[in-house]
Amino acid sequence: MKTATERIYETMTKNSKRHLRKKPAGDRFFKGWRRRHPIFLFLAVFAVLMGLFYGFAVFTPFYKRDFLLSYLPFNARVSGAILGFFGQDITVAGRTISSPDFSVEVYSGCDGIEPIALFVCAVLAFPAPFLRKLPGIIAGTLLLAILNFVRVVSLFGVGVYFPKAFLFMHLDVWQALFIFFAVLFWIVWLRWAAQNQISTQHVSS
């Protein structure tokens, strides 16, 4: 009986070999390297994708001027609606959520975009068919976006009732939790993709 780690590594190796068969026959060095080192290939592709994301976020005017100017107020409105549902006297103006006792502003970095990008790049870097990547990308993105609403709402509650703990919860607890959940969702998808790959192979054989 193979462990989950062994099944995942086996899937990475098989999928890497399958992709190699579609390449021209000339690059023997890279073909052999990819076959022997699928984990290093995954890490290299992941690093390139994350670099592209940060390049887009830093150097593209659209990201800051258009996307964030719409997405940050959207986060504030949804979080404010949730807080209002739980009985808080909430006013939302732009990306600022206010009550008589506390106010918080949703800045870039408090929007969940980086953990979502981390998750999406990890899924895309894994050598699996795109039809297995797509459900993971959609589900993981939605779950992490919802988790960010939970973060904003919980931090607002901490600011109202435990103001001295706000910075600790914001900078230490929630940042670590968000990365943890992004990695956890990726591992869950990874095991699903590997198990689905093995089941498909058994059926086809």
Image: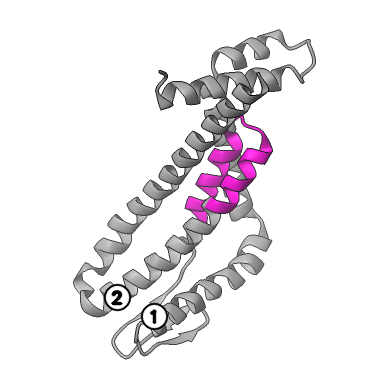
Q: Is residue 15 magenta?
A: no
- Residue bounds of the magenta highlight: 113-139
179 above or below 41? below
Q: Residue at x 51, y 45 (%)?
A: 119
Q: Is residue 133 magenta?
A: yes
**Could you tell me the amino acid type at mark 2?**
Gly
Residue assigned mark 1: 83
46 above or below 29? below
Q: Position of residue 96 (x, y in %)?
A: 45, 80
Residue 160: name its quadrant. bottom left
Q: Are dots 1 and 2 in contact, CB under 8 Å?
A: yes
Q: Earlier in the sequence, mark 1 or mark 2?
A: 1
Quarter holding the C terminus is: top right
Residue assigned mark 2: 157
Q: Position of residue 66 (x, y in %)?
A: 66, 68
Give me the disc on residue 135: none
